Amino acid sequence: MKKKGRQAFKKHYLIFVAACLAAAFLTAEFRGSLSFSTIRSYELNLNPSEAPPPSQRKSIAWEDILLNIAEHDTSSSRELSEQIKKNAIEQSKKGNPMFGRTRGAFSGLINAVSSGSIVVSAVAAVTSITGSENLGIFLLILIGELGFFLFWFFIQNTYPVIVRRIFMEGMNYSRVTPQRFLFLLRIKKWLKASRIMFVRYILYTLWCLTIAGIFIKRYSYFMVPYIAAENPDMSGRQAVTLSKTIMQGHKWECFVMELSFIGWQFLGLITFGLFNVLYTNPYKTAVFTQYYAQVRAIAKEKELPGTELLNDTWLYETPPASLIEEKYADVIAVMKKPVDETGGLTGWRAFLARNFGVLFFAREKEKQYERRQASWVKYQELMDDADGRAYPVRLYPIPEEQRRMLVDSLNYMRRYSVWSLIVIYLGLAIFGWLWEVALHLITYGTFVNRGALQGPWLPIYGLGSVLILTVLARLRRHPVLEFCTAIVLCGFLEYMTSVFMEFTTGGKKWWDYSGYFLNLNGRISAEGLLAFGIGGIAVVYVLAPLIDNIVNRISMKILRPVCIAVASVYLVDFIYSQFYPNTGSGITDIYAKIETCDAYAAGPEHPYGINIYAGIVQEYKL
């Protein structure tokens, strides 16, 4: 069993390690494996007599804030949290400017959590609703406890079932896809699995009140998560009873099996859990998965009561080719078609289609190609099943939820015509302008035409979207890689755009992320790049296909003149604005610039320089 476990572990190393690492982070299992990452600050190691007062600490002082709240002194708690926040902000200004704490959602979140003001605000909000501070504190504690219970019940309590399912599919197949983390959601049995594990937890907790029960019932209920992973469509009592039945006569054997890993656990201990994360936890789980398969087979052979519920045959056997051909006929038909990334195109048109996903004129041959690509996207995640490399989900006794028609229509591997790209560019440039205007209107209560152009568009939104669609076209089959590269591409685009606009407008800064947490020279920030990455994924896999579907329904007699007219107006505005850019109060980041004035006291060596300060005085008449 250990040999088979090692083979499966070697074959699926990355996803097995990832599954166990996620369990450790969620504290669902392997709780001691992350001790190597625990870092205690210097202040926490001080003797109580040497520790500074709470208001002067830069680290979390929640214990003092909660103590004040418990003593019904919310005003003192608020003052304390504000003082801690102020100290942290002052410290960030003296340190590396990229770790700003004064602006942005990330900074606000970090400040709120590190200072404890999030707790104070929650208490104040509940108190204002209930009209009683005591009742407010009680309700807040009750809500917090309920939140912790729900997280434990649905995530920590249930996640071991997901882990077992991934390891069980890895026994007999060469590929386990990340989609299997959503196994319980796709068959709509997450709640049932949670109930099964909850019943196990309650019964074992009660048995722990007896000395014998701590050891005996641990191994009686040992197979419950494996049983739930194979068939979550049963009651908690059925799963627990079946585990007891299967483990009858095997409890001592299972105990000895656990003892055989004591050497590996010792290596984990001396490496502060690191070895457990990278090897012991997934290896041990892989071996016990083999052990479950063995005791399950013995129980099925003896026809023990309840074993008929263990009906997922193809976890342990390879289905015959005839059955696969019957269930996956449509997928196999798509797979048998020759892969042609050009769709019959040649020359420069084939080059653009293959590398950038751009198509100038959609003829019938190209339309047929698009239909083949749509089929490929629809059946992509089933191709490994049909090829025999992954578990055949269509043969699972509980049918998985079918994808909706809308999802099937979002063929993200399509090629875009010039007209679609123009519509996407202008449409998202206008959307970006509306977004920023609305944001400024809500924040400051005034309407401002944002951006350097005179018209209602912000080119960086449209250009970033089109570049992600074209430059990263070959990465669309890999969403994670697409997300990461979209962040890099948009970060480079935003940084260079900032440099170019500043250079062409005489040193004027059009935006400034100084004070944002994780910013680079005030030109880009982690917060903005994360938004660009999420937006890029939305554009590639949802928005652009939807827009292209709409464009393809419009008659070319209407589409062409409208696109040409709007694009012409945009180009005229773009050229005109190079000589007469849109400027004035609110166009750029006002508060970032005003904050720069405060830094003038730092002298000429300040990175913003005197010229910027003089420009602010002239522009805003400060």
Image (spheres, rainbow, N blue to C red):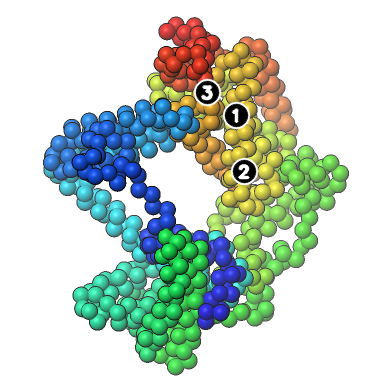
Residue 101 seen anywhere in this rendered image of the structure: yes
Residue 408 position, x and y percent, is 60, 54
Relative vertical location of residue 390 with respect to residue 615 in this rendering, above or below = below
Q: Which residue is mark 3?
A: 511
Camera-side residue: 256 or 336? 256
- Three-letter amino acid code of the residue under disc 1: Tyr
For marks 1 and 2, the one nearer the N-term is: 2
- Work out which residue is located at the far bottom of the displayed protein and give it: 302
Label 1 SS: helix
Residue 114 lies in what quarter of the image? top left
Q: Residue at x 67, y 54 (%)?
A: 374
Q: Which residue is mark 2?
A: 485
Left or right position of 102 against 529: left
For residue 495, the mark is 1
CA separation in Å, label 1 and label 2 = 15 Å
Left or right position of 612 against 115: right
Residue 563 position, x and y percent, is 69, 29
CB within 8 Å, label 2 to label 3:
no
Residue 428 lies in what quarter of the image? top right
For marks 2 and 3, the one nearer the N-term is: 2
Camera-side residue: 478 or 382? 478
CB within 8 Å, label 1 to label 2:
no
- Three-letter amino acid code of the residue under disc 2: Thr
Relative vertical location of residue 552 with respect to residue 35 in this rendering, above or below = above
Q: Residue at x 50, y 8 (%)?
A: 614
Residue 201 position, x and y percent, is 30, 70
Assess disc 3: are there few (<14), some (14-19) or many (≥20) residues with their C-alpha within 10 Å of its C-alpha: some
